[in-house]
């Protein structure tokens, strides 16, 4: 999955999309208030995404990497963290973070680690709403300040993975709920919610997961893959036994295990 989708699955919403600016040119924003163009420094460009979840919400690293130069409590984007990933060939700028950064230069981070807290800090102390500025660049140190601030690449073609779980099987079948169950973007209670599946819903699933001590299945909702937790996992009780003993939050039918365990 791309890093913007990863953040959306963590509950962030996009507030500024460089692919959707009025000019039709990727990143050409020309954000103007009362005659002042906030993007003048970069020739009208804002080659980054803005997202928001909640003021002081933890901001997760979208990929593994090393915290590198450009990271500063008083950087170009206020509280700034820069994480480089050589394997992916990118570096990621997280901007407008609260000043009390959660990482330091030289530190290794994993996807999902908190790098800072969403805030509204900035270089010129301009009044702004709390949000996350996230910018992607090709891997490598950029010594020129203007180039560092203004250069950015489209992250939608970058695959950062992001579906983490303890175990999975490529089993499929039907599941009928016996209670209301919250729909998630991926198999984690920390994933963003996407509505409620009602009691008595009959859904088809194409994958079974174990994560966070729960059984999860992957289902299709409005042509999008989603996940629901369907019961607590008990030591020594496998999935078939859990269904037979009534430990699941519903009943399984037409179970096909021929595709086996995910490698």
Image (cartoon, rainbow, N blue to C red):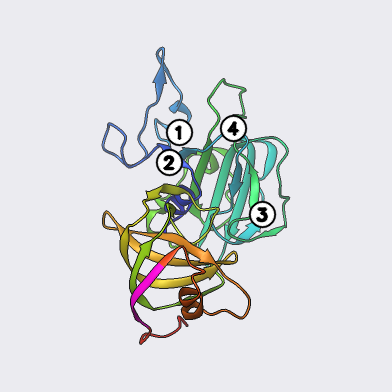
Mark 4 surroundings within 10 Å by alpha-carbon count, few (fewer than 14), some (14 through 19), many (20 or more): some
Residue 136 locus on image (x, y percent): 48, 50
Q: CA distance from mark 2 to mark 4?
A: 23 Å
Mark count? 4
Mark 1 surroundings within 10 Å by alpha-carbon count, few (fewer than 14), some (14 through 19), many (20 or more): some
Residue placed at 44% from the left, 60% from the top? 228
Furthest residue in direction top, as rendered = 34
Residue 236 locus on image (x, y percent): 61, 81
Q: Which secondary structure lies at badge 1?
A: helix
Range of residues picked out in magenta = 251-256
Q: Which residue is mark 1?
A: 42
Q: Relative to 174, does residue 67 appear above or below in the rendering?
A: above
Label disc, if present, on residue 47 of the rendered structure:
2
Residue 255 locus on image (x, y percent): 35, 79
Q: CA distance from mark 2 to mark 3?
A: 21 Å
Whether tag 1 and tag 2 are in contact, CB under 8 A, the answer is: yes
Dividing the picture into quarters, in which one does residue 74 lie?
Answer: top right
């Amino acid at each position: 999955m791309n890093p913007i989708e990863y953040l959306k699955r963590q509950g962030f919403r996009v507030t500024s999309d460089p692919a959707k600016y009025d000019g039709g040119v990727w990143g050409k924003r020309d954000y103007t208030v009362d005659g002042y163009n906030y993007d003048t420094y970069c020739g009208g460009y804002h080659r980054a995404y803005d997202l928001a979840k909640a003021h002081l919400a933890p901001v997760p690293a979208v990929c593994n990497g090393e915290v590198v130069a450009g990271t500063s409590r008083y950087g170009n984007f206020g509280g700034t963290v820069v994480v480089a990933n050589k394997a992916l060939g990118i570096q990621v700028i997280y901007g407008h973070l609260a000043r009390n950064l959660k990482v330091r230069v030289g530190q290794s981070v994993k996807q999902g680690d908190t790098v800072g807290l969403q805030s509204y800090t900035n270089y010129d102390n301009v009044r702004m709403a709390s949000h996350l500025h996230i910018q992607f660049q090709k891997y490598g140190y950029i010594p020129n300040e203007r180039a560092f601030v203004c250069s950015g690449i489209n992250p939608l073609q970058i695959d950062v993975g992001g579906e983490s779980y303890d175990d999975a099987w490529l089993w499929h079948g039907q599941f009928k709920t016996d209670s209301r169950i919250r729909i998630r973007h991926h198999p984690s209670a920390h994933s963003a919610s996407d509505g409620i599946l009602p009691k008595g819903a009959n859904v088809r699933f194409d994958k079974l997961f174990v994560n966070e001590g729960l059984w999860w299945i992957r289902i299709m909702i409005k042509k999008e893959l989603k996940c629901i937790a369907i019961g607590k996992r008990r030591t020594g009780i496998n999935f078939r036994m859990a269904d037979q003993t009534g430990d699941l939050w519903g009943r399984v039918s037409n179970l096909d295990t021929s595709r086996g365990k995910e490698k």
